[in-house]
């Protein structure tokens, strides 16, 4: 009996500590996924089944009618348009905002790390400070700026706001990544006659895939889920999806269609879930490749 207790554990077999760790991770994953399960199963139920009160129950009568209603028929504002036009608005906002903020952040990181000039650290500290400024503080100055530029109530105005607010984060990511970049490659290129944009476009940018992935995922998630700027600086024709979803859920007229609300919430969350499922492992690799250095 004692010999059995002292026998070495079979190679590859997990020990008690690792089994406990796995069980704890599975439990935490289930807790994390519970809201997703509730949203999904209740979006596939008729409204009468939800009114019975058991949100965890499996649907008795399956239906996709709530999804169809949330997408193209639900009453949002004065028109029964569903979330479809606002879903398009969010893509028209997110794609250029992510591309512009990523490109500007890459150029800023390049300048701050590859050129030695007197006020570089002070400028980087100012950009870093902007990362910690709450959204609420910039609302009034930004509203005045958009009014002067003629961009108030437009998708272009929302693009401008999100690009400006995201530059601090993207500069931080690229600056730290380029600070760890092999300087010998840059010096060799300059000795061969490469100029400012040649070094950036042919040396740095092609070797920046990990940090570009990190920045794109970060910016996409932040801008897609952003609500305050959308509610403050857009009008009915330029509402992003988050504002339209809020109007759908908080509508004070008619019957509260909770199954439609669940379907709408899932539609709003689907793009960010898809981005993380497809590129989540690249996000971790990018962070490990340099975004936390410097």
Image: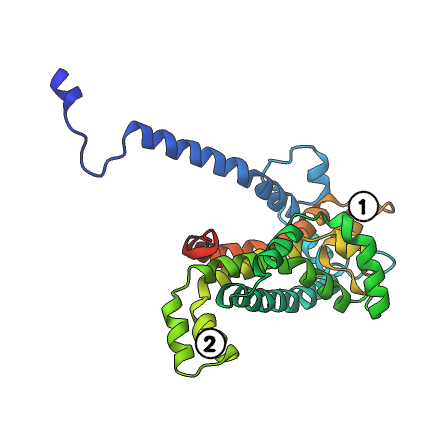
Question: Which residue lies at the image location 36% right of the left edge and 69% below the top edge?
Answer: 184
User: Which residue is at the far top?
Assistant: 1
Q: Position of residue 59 (x, y in %)?
A: 61, 42
What is the residue that sits farthest to the left in this orientation?
3
Q: In percent of the image, x 64 and y 43: which residue is there?
A: 42
Return the residue nearer the eye: 69 or 77: 77
Dot 2, crowdedness within 10 Å: few (<14), some or many (≥20)? many
Q: Earlier in the sequence, mark 2 or mark 1?
A: 2
Q: Which mark is residue 116?
A: none
Q: Dot 1: what SS?
A: loop
Q: Position of residue 277 (x, y in %)?
A: 49, 55
Relative to 95, say whether 254 is above or below. above
Q: Which residue is mark 2?
A: 199
Res 267 quadrant in image: bottom right
Q: Residue at x 64, y 50 (%)?
A: 129
Q: How far apart are the alpha carbons under marks 2 and 1? A: 52 Å
Residue that sits furthest to the front in the current view: 118
Residue 186 or 201: which is nearer the viewer?
186
Q: Is residue 72 above or below residue 137?
A: below
Q: Quadrant of the N terminus?
A: top left
Pointer 1 residue = 250
Q: Residue at x 68, y 47 (%)?
A: 262
Residue 149 rendering spot, x and y as whole percentages: 82, 69
């Amino acid at each position: 009996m004692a010999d059995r207790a002292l026998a070495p554990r079979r190679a590859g077999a997990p020990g008690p500590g690792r089994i406990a760790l796995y069980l704890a991770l599975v439990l935490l994953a289930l807790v994390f996924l519970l809201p997703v399960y509730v949203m999904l199963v209740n979006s596939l139920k008729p409204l009468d089944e939800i009114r019975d009160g058991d949100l965890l129950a499996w649907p008795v009568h399956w239906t996709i009618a709530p999804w169809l209603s949330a997408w193209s028929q639900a009453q949002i504002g004065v028109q029964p348009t569903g979330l479809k036009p606002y879903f398009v608005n969010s893509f028209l906002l997110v794609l250029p905002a992510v591309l512009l903020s990523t490109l500007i952040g890459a150029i800023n990181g390049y300048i701050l790390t590859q050129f030695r000039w007197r006020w570089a650290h002070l400028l980087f500290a100012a950009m870093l400070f902007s990362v910690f400024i709450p959204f609420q503080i910039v609302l009034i100055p930004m509203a005045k700026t958009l009014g002067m530029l003629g961009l108030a109530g437009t998708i272009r105005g929302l693009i401008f706001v999100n690009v400006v607010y995201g530059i601090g984060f993207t500069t931080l990511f690229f600056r730290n990544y380029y600070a760890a970049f092999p300087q010998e490659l840059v010096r060799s290129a300059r000795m061969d006659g490469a100029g400012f944009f040649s070094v950036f476009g042919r040396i740095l940018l092609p070797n920046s895939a990990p940090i570009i992935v990190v920045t794109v995922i970060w910016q996409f998630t932040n801008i897609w889920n952003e609500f305050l700027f959308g509610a403050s600086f857009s009008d009915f024709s330029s509402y992003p999806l988050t504002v339209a979803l809020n109007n759908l859920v908080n509508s004070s007229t008619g019957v509260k269609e909770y199954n439609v609300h669940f379907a709408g919430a899932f539609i709003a969350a689907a793009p960010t879930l898809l981005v993380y499922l497809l590129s989540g492992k690249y996000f971790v690799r990018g962070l490990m490749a340099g975004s936390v250095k410097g």
